[in-house]
Image: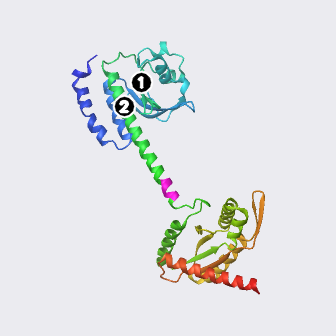
Amino acid sequence: MTMLSTDPVVRELIDALPDVVAQADSLETLVRPLLELLETVTGLESTYLTTIDIEAGYQRILFARNTRRMKVPEGLSVPWEDTLCKRALEDGSTYVSDVPERWGNVDAARELGIATYASTPVHTGDGHLYGTLCAASDERRPGVPGAMHVMEMFSKLIAQQVEREQTVQSLRQANDELSVSAHTDQVTRLPNRRALLESMERRLAATATDGGRVLVAFIDLDGFKGINDRYGHAIGDRFLIAIGQRLQGVLRGLDLVARQGGDEFVVLSSAAADAAPAMAEALSARLLAATCGSFALGELTIDYDGPSIGVIVAEPGASDAEALLERADAAMYQVKRQRKERLQH
């Protein structure tokens, strides 16, 4: 066979490799040109990249290129124990031109009609076996000098791309987690004040075009300090979580409940302009009913008389979320004063 160093076609393809790597923006856009190059370098008509899940016990054909009779289908999954890749790794064999005689008991190879087989593992930097880069033919073919060296080089390029994509995925996941954390109350796991204000701003902007009204219910847990003082902060946190769950249980449609902070919660709702006053009264009654009564907190049960709730309807054209929240807070304090007066009488 012609040596790689003197074959002008192969040399031209290898010289084009830097451009292939530079233009690749994903694993697929890197691997598909490499499979084409690998076919030319090895002279084997089927080239493919696999992934291996040792724990699940399966190998899967991720990308494949087939140019003649033999077809290695993309997406094919076979038991890892019944693969040429596993036999090659165990035997330390990278190129075999007598597959039927040597590994005739491998069902997958027999069904595909593989006679000649070459492979190299794809290991990521931490030593993890990601998969294998393979080439195969249904004819017996002698090895091309230098082909396995090229194959190993390709496997390293693939491993580097896999690591890059894994790093990007990890960064995205970490960013998503940070974003969720930044918008989530750590005790109740409800949206926090930051998420609340952002949602209020979006809703207020939407009402400018649809003519609807934003309803804001400000909830203050009367007597919460006494619960904390008497039973401890662990029980206090359980109570906050239980309150949040009950509030979530009576939300409707696109309603949102958030923990404003401390013993304060806020519920956002929406209504048509003409129905907003009645909806505000109904929302207040629904929230009060949900937050009164017995709360089973592990082995302890607390009978709770309910919070003070102030509900307001945003005026047309309102756009300041902080100002709207202050109005709802003032409405809540008016309700709180009325409750205290009733108790005094």
Position of 255 relative to 277 (above/below): above
Q: Nearer the viewer, mark 2 or mark 1?
A: 2
Secondary structure type for disc 2? helix
Secondary structure type for disc 1? strand
N-terminal-most mark, 2 or 1: 1
Q: Nearer the viewer, residue 176 or 211?
A: 176
Magenta residue check for 299: no
Where residue 119 appears, x then y in whole percent?
Answer: 41, 24
Q: Residue at x 62, y 81 (%)?
A: 333
Where residue 30 appears, x then y in whole percent?
Answer: 35, 38
Q: Nearer the viewer, residue 105 or 180?
A: 180
Position of 7 relative to 199 (above/below): above
**Residue holding disc 2:** 156
Name the image quarter holding the C terminus: bottom right
Magenta residue check for 178: yes
Tell me the chief SS of the magenta region. helix
The kind of residue on which mark 2 rests is: Lys
- Asked whether disc 2 touches disc 1, contact meaning CB atoms under 8 Å apart, the reply is no
Q: Which residues are magenta?
A: 176-181
How far is mark 2 from mark 1, CA to CA? 13 Å
- Furthest residue to the front? 229
Q: Residue at x 58, y 68 (%)?
A: 261
**Residue holding disc 1:** 119
